[in-house]
Image (cartoon, rainbow, N blue to C red):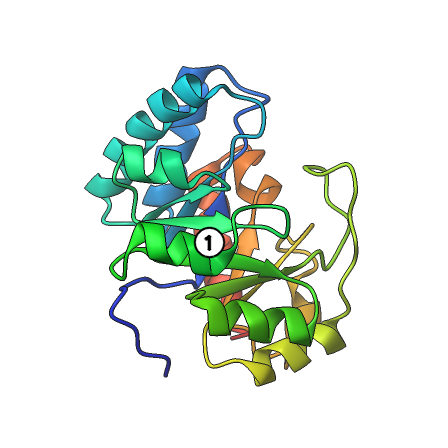
Amino acid sequence: MYKTMRNFDPYLYFITDSTIYDEDEFLYRVEKALKGGVTLMQLREKNKSTKEYIELAEKVHAISKRYNVPLIIDDRVDVALAIDAEGVHLGASDMPIKTARKIMGEDKIVGATAKTVPWAKQAYEEGADYLGVGAIFPTTTKVKTVLTSTDTLREICESVPIPVNAIGGLNISNVDVLKNTKIDGLCVVSAIMKANNPQKAAEELKSKLKEII
């Protein structure tokens, strides 16, 4: 079992998408997902201004704290620090992980995207606490999707001592493909965000994961 001074559970990692809802509906769905058993949550906003991002992040953080679920801010170390979020997630074109670790400090969670074994090892060595690996399937949330095979996913899991989560187009109907990959958790966006009942969707995914992890 991986041990860290930064306490989090990567089992069911929910990544938000506010682009298709007004704010009230978005926050309602976030809370429903948390009620459904999400264990880690990332606020991902690609198109908001810094001010808008911070304002929304404060509202989301107020909800996540009630459920004792860490909030990770996508891309933006400044936004994470501004609202005292529990962590930040960084992609290939974002701030270097070692720089983010230096700025965020030792008590915050720093996550990273990785698509190859060397990339995963470098992220770990620079201070990443967990990795998001994918896309396993094409996604509706990103225009360009580079797919990652389950073999590569398994190799990454075996190459680093930190949690590895699968991401990319995953939902309850296709997660069986992840059996025997040694993942620590699942990242989903649409499977919860766009569900008719986000709470039920989270509950069903969490139950389904017991067959895989």
The residue positioned 32% from the left and 51% from the top of the image is 104
Q: Image height check: is 83 above or below 7?
A: above
Q: Is residue 23 visible?
A: yes
Q: Choose between 190 and 84: the one closer to the eye.
A: 84
Closer to the camera in the image, 144 or 77: 77
As shown in the figure, which amino acid type bears the numbered disc 1?
A: Tyr
Q: Is residue 38 visible?
A: no
**Image side of residue 96 versus residue 129, left or right:** right
Position of 83 compared to 186: left or right? left
Q: Is residue 6 left or right of residue 36?
A: left
**Residue 30 pos. (x, y %):** 40, 34
Circle 1 residue? 13
Q: Position of residue 21 (x, y in %)?
A: 53, 19
At a point 49% along the width and 14% down the height, the residue shown is 22
Q: Residue at x 45, y 44 (%)?
A: 200
Q: Position of residue 98 (x, y in %)?
A: 45, 61
Helix, strand or loop status at disc 1: strand
Residue 170: percent from left, percent from top: 65, 54
Determine which quarter of the picture holds residue 173: bottom right
Relative depth, front residue between 45 and 186? 45
The N terminus, quarter of image: bottom left
Relative to 46, is 130 above or below?
below
Who's the residue at 41% across and 41% down the image?
Answer: 77
